[in-house]
Amino acid sequence: MRVARYFVARVALIILLFAPMPATAAGSVALILDASGSMNARLPEGRTRIEAAKLAVADLVGKLPVDIRLSLWAYGHQSPTSKHDCRDTQRIVAFDAIGANRESVVVKTLGIKAQGYTPITYVIKLVADDLAKEDAKPRTIILISDGKETCEGDPCATAKALADADASLIVHTIGFAVDIAARYQLQCMASMARGRYFDAGSMSELSAMLAEAAKPIPPPQPVKQIVISQPQPGLLEVRRADMKGHKVTAAVTGEIVGSLNSSGPRKALPAGLYNVTFGNAVWKSVEVKSGETTVLDPGVIEIRNANIAGHKVLDAETGEEIGKISSSSPRITVLPSTFSVQFGELLWKDIEVKSGEQKILSPGVIELAGLKTNGARVLSEDGSLAGRIVSSWPRLALPAGKYVVDVSGQRVPVDLAEGAKLELKLN
């Protein structure tokens, strides 16, 4: 409640203090705000990402020249993550001179709730179509995102196609507390659409980057080029590549152009945009440049004492299955991101894997000697089922915690430590 009162007071102060600035040579700016579920994560400063973004937007519109035409869009704000809604986007405030819609932008931003998916490709297509109706130039998109695309499509390839179709279109992107895979994608979008990429990790940094991105700049004039030689191919390399391989496809056409694995982790490719699979996930918008080496540096999740039935690896934001780890295949190469891993009926949550990091999970193990064919249940403290132990595999790996082992109605409480092995013998 105190945070909410502070936020309203801060916004009101912004509206009162910032008088309209003098008119300037201005264009049209479409501001896109990420309201996906991950925007509810807290920053080191204490406030959530979405709270910080709302303050930064209010700060921006309080400073913009009165003749800049502004519209506000959001995505992920209308449907919860569980609905997997890849069409969840909306124009919150239509284009108008900021002198006329400043208050509306601030008030409407207050009502945005972060909860859903990240359909970046879909939203920039809609915003570009809306911008195309504007006479004012340049026509600029400013995208604030704390994550990568979670829906179909390649946002970088789409940004390039949109910029190719409209010489006055500029796309700036701001990565707000992003991981390396999201940063790579957002950087690619800006690079392909005559824009700039900005990094921000706090409300003050986001406010400053927004102000920088909103500065009107004229679109570059066409440059006459004379091609005198064929471009050289580039190299694409995946560090710590899986034995199973990573399929590489052309981002624009979807054509499969090769596969990278532990025995062949690099491949020569024509300059262009590519997508690379990591299990069921895709590292999108990978730019290979002529004569250069592009290196993807993913992370690895490894489980010690893994269950024979395996452990699903889930994207922490969407809940989508990325891949599986088992006793016979105890590690998986993943995009740098945050994951949950399934242990029996439980989830080991908020596993952050950074670029180049090998994240080792060491669950505890409950082992039953002398188990009969009926098996045993393992319950969490609240009485819910954590997993089952069967005679054919009389052991169960679980996150550290307090459990109850239920064998034929006899309940034995156990305190399982991380990496420990607990043996129970049945007479």
Image (tube, rainbow, N blue to C red):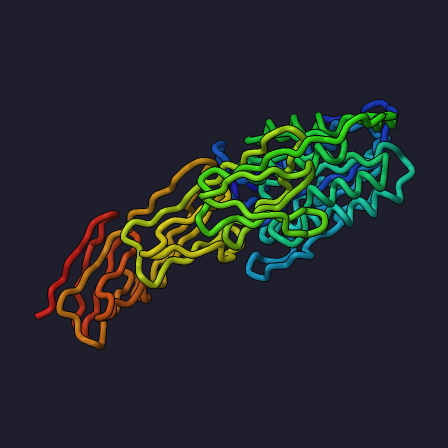
Seen from the viewer's position, the closer of residues 51 and 275 is 275
Counting every numbered tag in the picture gives 0
Instruction: Name the spot of residue 206 as percent of width and height, x first.
Output: 62, 31
Most extreme residue toward the right is 135
230 horizontally vs 68: left or right: left
Q: Residue farthest to the front?
A: 229
Report the side of 349 relative to 93 (left or right): left
Residue 145 found in image quarter: top right
Residue occupying image coordinates x 68% and y 52%: 254
The residue at the point 42 percent across, 56 percent down is 324
Describe residue 141's horizontal placement relative to residue 188 as left or right.
Answer: right
Residue 365, position in %: x, y? Answer: 23, 55
Q: Is residue 321 visible?
A: yes
Locate residue 11 relative to residue 37 in the image: left or right: right
The residue depicted at 66 percent of the width and 51 percent of the height is 119
Residue 52 is at least partly visible in this image = no
- Residue 343 position, x and y percent, is 35, 58
Image quarter (top left, top right, bottom left or bottom right) of the C terminus = bottom left
The picture places residue 232, in percent across and down from the top left corner, at 69, 31
Find the residue positioned furthest to the left. 427
